[in-house]
Image (cartoon, helix red, strand yellow):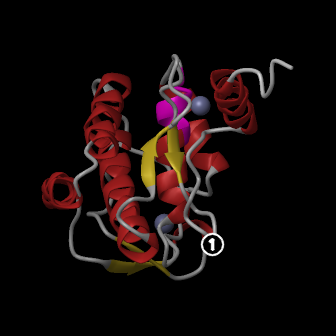
Amino acid sequence: MHLNPYGEYAVLMAASLANDWPDDREGIVARTREFGMTMDFLAGADDLAASRAVLDEWLRVVDEVDPHARAALLNAALAAASAYPRLTDHNGEGWHLHYRDADQTLPHVLAAVISVGTALHLTTRGMHRLRRCAAGDGCRNVVVDVTRNGRQRYCSVRCANRAAVRRHRARGPISAA
Ligand SMILES: [Zn+2]
Ligand SMILES: [Zn+2]
């Protein structure tokens, strides 16, 4: 996987996993393929549960809105998961950097890729560009804001429309005349 300067693919992959958690290990691996990862992962004893724990830790970062507290959570995740950067050219991807040790299990790779990608995303795009969907009423989806103006608040057009309808209703009738 190429962690581009914005960390965009890694953080979008994390949101995709958080918003639509796969049923099994194969589903997680398939999702990593969708987001451009090509490598094979070593099989671990409990990859599904351990990967879920990585996502739950990441959701704590999503839910922490204070930038300093958010950075502290992310720094702890980086310390636990990442390693010195190294050049690699596996699977014909072309030369790119890995921020982790070689030959790791799926949850270890996810922990490194997601923490580094999120750190790159927040530091290059803005510390506030990660949140839960603002629609509320049951939608807990994660929103990764990669828009130009940095004002994305909803996970989908559907949630944006629902919120607009609610605002409209709250205003009530324009005139009783
Ligand atoms: Zn790679
Ligand atoms: Zn939503």
Reply yes or no: does residue 53 show up in magenta. no
Q: Answer few, some or many: residues within 10 Å of disc 1's Cα (few below 14, many 20 plus, some between 14 and 19).
A: few
Q: Provide the residue designation for mark 1.
A: 92
Is residue 148 shown left or right of residue 150?
A: right
Q: Residue furthest right?
A: 177
Is residue 129 shown left or right of residue 59?
A: right
Rendering coords of residue 68 (x, y %): 16, 61
> Residue at horizontal 31%, vertical 56%?
115
Question: Taking the image as drawn, is residue 41 in sight?
Answer: yes
Question: Taking the image as drawn, is residue 44 in sight?
Answer: no
- Is the C terminus in the top left, top right, bottom left or bottom right quadrant? top right
Which contiguous range is marked in magenta? 16-22
Q: Nearer the viewer, residue 165 or 101?
A: 165
Classify 147 as above or below 176: below
Q: Quadrant of residue 107?
A: top left
Is residue 104 shown left or right of residue 146?
A: left
- Residue type at the position of mark 1: Gly
Rendering coords of residue 116 (x, y %): 33, 64
